[in-house]
Amino acid sequence: MANLINRRQLTIEWGQCDPAGIVYNPHFFEFFDWGTWTLFELALGVKPSELGKMFGIIGIPLVDAGARFLAPAKFGDVVEIASQVSAFRRSSFDVTHRISVGGTLAVEGSETRVWAVRDPADPSRIKARPIPPEVTAKFQM
Amino acid sequence: MANLINRRQLTIEWGQCDPAGIVYNPHFFEFFDWGTWTLFELALGVKPSELGKMFGIIGIPLVDAGARFLAPAKFGDVVEIASQVSAFRRSSFDVTHRISVGGTLAVEGSETRVWAVRDPADPSRIKARPIPPEVTAKFQM
Amino acid sequence: MANLINRRQLTIEWGQCDPAGIVYNPHFFEFFDWGTWTLFELALGVKPSELGKMFGIIGIPLVDAGARFLAPAKFGDVVEIASQVSAFRRSSFDVTHRISVGGTLAVEGSETRVWAVRDPADPSRIKARPIPPEVTAKFQM
Amino acid sequence: MANLINRRQLTIEWGQCDPAGIVYNPHFFEFFDWGTWTLFELALGVKPSELGKMFGIIGIPLVDAGARFLAPAKFGDVVEIASQVSAFRRSSFDVTHRISVGGTLAVEGSETRVWAVRDPADPSRIKARPIPPEVTAKFQM
């Protein structure tokens, strides 16, 4: 497990809550996405929007995502998202996200993403590529 | 006023409603956007995603939007969006949207959009261009 | 596996796509949510907004969700969501969602939900309750 | 014009941008909503989620909203939202929002909202009520 953890706080907004008064679940997957982008910014020191240019990739597309919802988050709650790469493989990696409300774990999520380039043989497709070791090294503190 | 009207029905979803149990207002601006795209599809017989290619434009970007909220829409309500170009000018146009619930007008909206191309002098900018008369003609029944 | 399948078609909207031109992943979890609501409407013949009243529950809250992203969906694509209860347990159940584009499976998702009532001992909390057999029976064709 | 201004910074997220690479317009109306809630928090010293309880209202529902889009905001841009009550009337008020990117005004918006209670004669409806002078006073610095 890469030990660099990105912690981000945000306040739950009115429009993120549903008629039950709690966060509508797809928003948590946005939070995961934001958590990953800012984790990469923390690790690599480059704005997420510059990531593609810097490494010659088209991005880090998501291939798998999941979440367990343990406790609700409500309008006005301050939540913390702690994001960490839990595994680097040759050309893909897993990110674990823990969302807590007042110190209590509310949502646990995971994403699997791919280090992707445009396929030279067919530019309409993408291809996984080995993650450079200088990238993975940055996630070790 | 161009007399072609696009009518589109949709059912209000759980996740589009806020803790007050009614549609969170930004979703109505999504409905306006969808209404305009499908109005153009109806008028021009071309899928919205093909609009740019067909007319050599980069799109029809929004420069102004507004709405009056007269009555709420709730989870499960079937709403109708009636969209109509209310004015064509040289290189811009207005679209009026009327959203009704059970026959009662609930939201009245308007958008002003521009017929836009990439600026040949600076490709990072856009430029308004005259709307082709064969386009405006299609909005008259 | 309950053999009733709800099939729902929708057209991918401009605002559901990200700068890569493909559906931003959290929207798929909205699609799953919509798929489950309309599956219940199909099975039980009751509008989703009436579900709570009819069965004395506060809802069917989500406790687990996951998705595998196999192929992208783009602006203008017509997608089909096929939703089916893959397992009923005493007080919880799983729903499987298959999203296809032009007949090709693009996203495979699953949700675990609970049949929930307000806890009589503490109305701020919820409690799982056995799913009535007359409910589960309706998901068999 | 009430001279208290709430300034809030946020970074544009990947999922808030559309295939043109710029913020999808309905998100600006979310930003206006967030701007109003945090302006009220700044003025009244009470969390938005407590506003109803404190003043015996059901909320401050939106009756009118509008925006002019002057320049785009892109993924990674840091934007500032400056929100200010531009007019207090007997039972309604206007909020003006100015969104700037790098010091340049990008979006100018306005909202009209109502100070609302549940109608005692019919609890399914809402009624405008006079805004307490101790509330309006708090928006003067």
Image (cartoon, coloured by chain):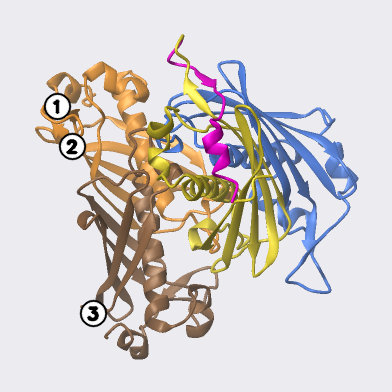
Chain colours: A blue, B brown, C yellow, D orange
Marks 3 and 2 close (CB-CB < 8 Å): no
Image quadrant in which the N terminus of chain C is located: top right
| Main SS class of the magenta portion in the image | loop
Number of marks present in the image shown: 3
Q: Is residue B52 left or right of residue B94?
A: right
The three-letter amino acid code for the residue at tag 2 is: Phe
The three-letter amino acid code for the residue at tag 1 is: Ile
- The image position of residue D106, as x and y in percent, is 40, 53
- Magenta stretch holds residue C126: yes
**Residue tagged 2:** D93
- The image position of residue D86, as x and y in percent, is 20, 39
Picture residue at 37% right of the left edge, 48% below the top: B26
Q: Earlier in the sequence, mark 2 or mark 1?
A: 2
Question: Bounds of the magenta span?
Answer: C122-141
**Residue tagged 1:** D131
Q: Residue lying farthest bottom?
A: B134
- Magenta stretch holds residue D91: no
What is the chain letter for disc 3?
B
Quarter of the rendering containing residue C99:
bottom right
